[in-house]
Image (cartoon, rainbow, N blue to C red):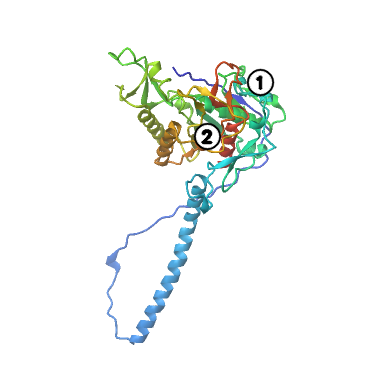
Amino acid sequence: MVQKNQNLYEWKMPPETMSDSDLIGFRFRSYSHVNWAHCKRFRLRPINRFNVISSCLFIVVVAIICGYVYLYESVQPVTTLVTEKITVDSEEDDSKGVCNLYDGTWVVDETYPLYNASQCPFAETSFNCLANGRRDKGYLKWRWKPKNCDVSRFDVGETLEKLRGKRVVFVGDSLSRTQWESMICLLMNGVDDKTSVYEINGNKISKKIRYLGVLQFHVEFYRSVFLVRIGSVPKRSPKRVRSTLKLDELDVVSSKWIDSDILVFNTGHWWNRAKLFEMGCYFKVGGRLKLGMSTMSAYTTALTTWASWVENMVDTDRTRVFFRTFEGSHWSGPKGHTCEVTENPLSISSTRDYRSGFSDIIRSVVKNMSVPVMAMHVTPMGSFRSDAHVGTWSDNPTVPDCSHWCLPGVPDAWNQILFSYL
């Protein structure tokens, strides 16, 4: 049911003129064993009481001073590290001045958009809303601005240099594919010779061509809408069961994700009744069919499987791992089938819907992992952008789309935040 696509492009660049800096590490050892057999007893002779008291006070004062200096030197670096971690993704009160990159608003920026989708051969026609007849251009001019800080201005030259020799891998559904396309279009602005960007295997660029090489680094997309493996139907299953999701096993192509420097995951839009139960797809754990398992429970189990895989299979000393939360969508109407694209972003974010439930699960699973993984909590920022969806400006205008985003658009902000971590 899930198609795996694998494609590769490469950009060429002159070799580096500078070598990498040497890194030096230190190892500390602690010795706590004492051989008390070597200790001797001494008999104290009578001495002046005043001298004893003075000596004791002096020792106490010196001990306090030394202890303060020691504790200050020891604790200070730890405090800095914790502060840096909190400033990236925190839900602290705004009054404390904490920088949460995902808590903010959209502001008009006349320097936007950052690229022209019609000049980027990797932007799908389906997402190029201007080329598909959208007349208003205001949706292109919005930049994400966190409340107490700012996302670094996108510097294509600096970003290309940071990614030199790296392998960037996106894994997930079509929203992940959109972020993949956004990244390539952003980076192409820094390449003078556009012909240096090509598909490694010589394939024509299409939805099935998803590997790109850029300036001696690779940007790849793997389609895995559930992240877990598609399973067979157990014998003597009800007729309504036509396929299964093996929640305790990761996708069969997961071995191809491991050897990467930046690994970005997402899954969510396929976890609903229409894409699962109405299609005859049910859950399986330990080889047993789980007909009564809810979607949320299955999603949690799948993400726990993913987390275990990351902890045991990915070298997080080398690989930076990210998981993007559920993107906001703006379907409306009694049955949620109405798509009305506005001209401007919403003034109030409405994030507490079923999508937030998925995002809460993602953040909880990531928080409890034993290795460093960053949850990119993009759900709130997308909830404002009812103006930025594809709507009817796709290659098939008869099918409205309030899930995917126009390019340029919201996925560019995701990538700018991703670049800021680098």
Q: Residue at x 53, y 41 (%)?
A: 102
> What crowding class fits label 1: few (fewer than 14 Cα within 10 Å), some (14-19), or many (20 or more)?
few
What percent of the width, then of the height, locates residue 46?
Answer: 29, 86
Q: Nearer the viewer, residue 369 or 293?
A: 293
Image spot of residue 198 (x, y percent): 64, 23
Q: Is residue 57 left or right of residue 181?
A: left
Q: Is residue 387 left or right of residue 288?
A: right
Residue 272 is at least partly visible in this image? yes
Mark 2 vs 1: CB contact within 8 A: no
Quarter assignment of residue 252: top left
Give the residue pinned by disc 2: 383
Q: Residue at x 52, y 20 (%)?
A: 5
Q: Is residue 285 left or right of residue 113?
A: left
Res. 370 visible in picture: no
- SS at mark 1? loop
Residue type beneath disc 1: Gly
Name the residue beneath numbered marker 1: 133
